[in-house]
Image (tube, rainbow, N blue to C red):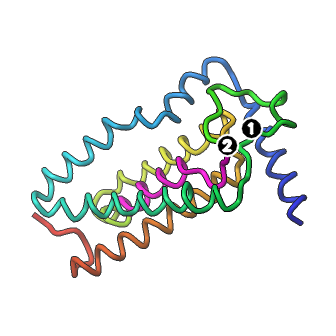
């Protein structure tokens, strides 16, 4: 069963990785680079401060906690535990893939990029989705970042899927903790 799942995951990875065109390389690199999103994160913190004043501190800490949980589960727990090589480090695949970037870390299960972007998208949706429906677009952003990890050869689809699940769960845990500690069902109104 495990071998069949790995074969299916590898076949799906090769299919998705081969949806490759030169004009898309730069866009996928832009999506996959962490520093690309720093202005977005700063804008989000500024918006939270403007909208909620000093009470934004709890919201920002909730987002940080959620991302910390998802990132550490992937990077500090699962990658060393599973020791699953990234596709770009897999000798049998190196000649078959389109690596757009240098490979990065040795192990890839589960994708921290997928986990962290889905954590942020889900956290913001749980916190603000009822009042700000436009936060739903962040799930498209998380999907694009996650696909970029397959496109650049860094992750298998199951790495990304597991990361998305971990990120979603981390968001639910952190936002539930926020609601419990804040004693409110929604962020405070100004």
Task: Provide the residue designation for mark 1.
Answer: 89
2 or 1: tag closer to the N-terminus: 1
Q: Residue furthest top?
A: 22
* Coordinates of residue 39 in the picture (x, y in percent): 31, 35
**Residue at which label 2 appears:** 106
Q: Which region shows up in magenta? A: 106-125
Q: Please indicate whether residue 177 sits to the left or right of residue 164 in the image.
A: left
Q: Position of residue 16 (x, y in %)?
A: 73, 38
Image quarter in which the C terminus is found: bottom left
As drawn, the label of residue 123 is: none
- Viewer-proximal residue, 112 or 80? 80
Quarter-of-image position of residue 154: top right
Q: Which of the two residues, 93 or 114, is positioned nearer the viewer here?
A: 93
Q: Are marks 2 and 1 in contact (CB under 8 Å)?
A: yes
Pinpoint residue 111: horizontal percent, then vertical percent.
60, 50
Q: Is residue 43 left or right of residue 11?
A: left
| Callout 2 secondary element | loop
Q: Residue 96 location in percent, x, y? A: 83, 30
What kind of secondary structure does the magenta stretch mostly adopt?
helix
Q: Is residue 98 left or right of residue 175?
A: right
Describe the element under mark 1 as helix, strand or loop.
helix
Q: Residue 14's image quarter?
A: top right
Q: Residue at x 35, y 51 (%)?
A: 134
Answer whether residue 189 is magenta in the image: no
Would residue 51 appear left or right of 116 to someone viewing this image? left
**Residue 118 located within the stretch drawn in magenta:** yes
């Amino acid at each position: 069963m495990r071998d069949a799942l790995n074969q299916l995951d590898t076949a799906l990875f090769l299919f998705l990785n081969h949806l490759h065109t030169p004009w898309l390389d730069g866009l996928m690199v832009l999506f996959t680079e962490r520093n690309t999103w720093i202005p977005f994160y700063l804008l989000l913190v500024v918006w939270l401060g403007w909208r909620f004043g000093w009470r934004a501190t709890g919201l920002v800490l909730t987002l940080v906690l959620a991302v910390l949980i998802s990132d550490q589960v992937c990077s500090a727990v699962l990658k060393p535990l599973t020791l699953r090589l990234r596709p770009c480090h897999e000798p049998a695949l190196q000649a078959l893939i389109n690596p757009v970037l240098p490979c990065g870390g040795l192990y890839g299960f589960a994708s921290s990029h997928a986990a962290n972007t889905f954590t942020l998208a889900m956290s913001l949706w749980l916190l603000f989705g009822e009042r700000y429906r436009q936060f739903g677009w962040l799930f498209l952003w998380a999907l694009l970042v996650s696909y970029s990890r397959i496109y650049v050869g860094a992750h298998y689809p199951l790495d990304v899927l597991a990361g998305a699940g971990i990120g979603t769960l981390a968001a639910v845990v952190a936002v539930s903790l926020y609601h419990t500690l804040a004693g409110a069902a929604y962020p405070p109104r100004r």
